[in-house]
Amino acid sequence: MKSIVALAAIVFPPLAFASGEGAGHALDLTGSDVGAVAIAVFVVAYLLVMAEEYTHLRKSKPVILAAGIIWLMIGRVYHQHGMSELAEAAVRHNLVEYAELMLFLLVAMTYINSMDDRRVFDALRAWLIRKGFGFRQLFWLTGILAFFISPVADNLTTALLMCAVVMAVAGGNARFVSLACINIVVAANAGGAFSPFGDITTLMVWQKGVVEFWTFFLLFVPALVNFAVPAAIMHFAVPAGQPRVGDEYVEMKRGAWGVIALFLATIVTAVGFHNFIGLPPVIGMLTGLSYLQFFGYYLKKTAYRERVKTNNGEIGDIVAFDVFRGVARAEWDTLLFFYGVVLCVGGLGFMGYLALASETMYSQWGATSANVSIGLLSAIVDNIPVMFAVLTMQPDMSLGQWLLVTMTAGVGGSLLSIGSAAGVALMGQARGQYTFFSHLRWMPVVALGYAASILAHMWLNASIF
């Protein structure tokens, strides 16, 4: 039974997560019927998550239900043994971990939604369309912008913005759309790998204190290699023509530059709270949310300065800025999915799967092989539970290896179109032109970039391995 569980922990790394507190005194349930049922519940839930594109069942629903079932079984067993306090401590530890990340992400999403409300992204898209770039120029420009915007905004928002530009100028050229979308997905995922704000996985590693804020930027060149290698090869397959030029002009709403400036100030505050006074970054982010709230109050009180014209040229109703609209538009399905994952995987780990997976992957395979494999698995299994598993295993690794797994978990999702939120979203946005199989056709090229980025990291940062 334990050998089967160990194999499952390799195929599904999330099973390796465990609560770090009290695990040494916890009951070993890996050989019990309760453990087997818990694994089955989680696997079924995760299969439903992977099938979201076809079932249209929101991914948060199955994992939240699975989390409740798993902890119900744990609570019952520990109650029977008179050890309810241990189970309670474990679940509270997981809730604190989740709360810190959820609140951090909620503030970031609110700022991104506020910038969208102020039409920042629409203005950028319209500017790109008006410039009249060629197909190959647009291929590189959208990729480069995705690479540099993703470290600040999330890769999903970045990818959707760049894809909107591609779709607006493509003129029905399906080949250009397909190649540009692949390039955008790779670039957005690569850009998120070298910044603590670029992806949930890097955020988790930073908040856990494993890697310092500025150390992440050692991954800049390897991440750039991950994007540039496949882009350079695909460049020759991009049509050499000129798309149609649009004349759309979008004016940003009043306060747009203020929201951008306050977002940067919020990032600085979060970094300062963590680096200089040792408090969790989420405290700095929530402090930064107050900046936006006060600025929103100012915009609301001075809304009379705005002039909104309707299609017939008349002055229409003024809709004042409301910060809570940004909160309401946050990706709540993603945030709740994250809750389900943390609680599910935390419960399975509390049962005793941490030692099994850690021994197999990091003691027998070695850190490099394990970390490269984790990146490959993230093309199929969501990188959030994958990284959470590694963080809670806490394998004895060098800083170079921690950076390696941070990068591979982030960029490994580019290998398949279903491997990241950016890829899944673009399949819907460019339906029929960017598909699973059109991405799969170029997977060897993307894999070449994946391998090149690993080699670049191991060479450039050899001193920290």
Image (cartoon, grey):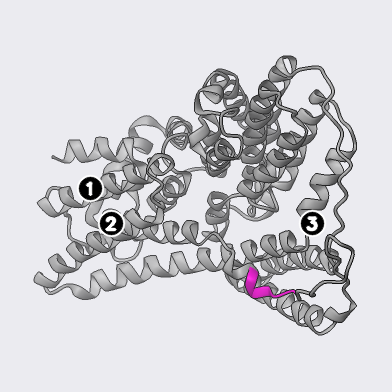
Secondary structure at badge 2 equals: helix
Q: Percent from the top left, x then y, of residue 388?
A: 43, 51
Residue in the picture at 84% in, 29% down: 244
Residue 26 in magenta stretch: no
Residue at image mark 2 = 66
- Per the rendering, the mark at residue 39 is 1
Q: Residues within 10 Å of mark 2 (few under 14, many from 20)?
A: many
Residue at image mark 3 = 120
Residue in the picture at 84% in, 23% down: 242
Pointer 2 or 3: first along the chain: 2
Q: Percent from the top left, x then y, of residue 120?
A: 79, 56
Span colored in magenta: 321-325
Residue 322 in magenta stretch: yes
Please name the amino acid that badge 1 sits on. Ile
Front-lying residue, 170 or 87? 170
* CB atoms of marks 2 and 3 within 8 Å: no
Q: Is residue 9 above or below residue 200?
A: above
Q: Is residue 167 left or right of residue 57?
A: right
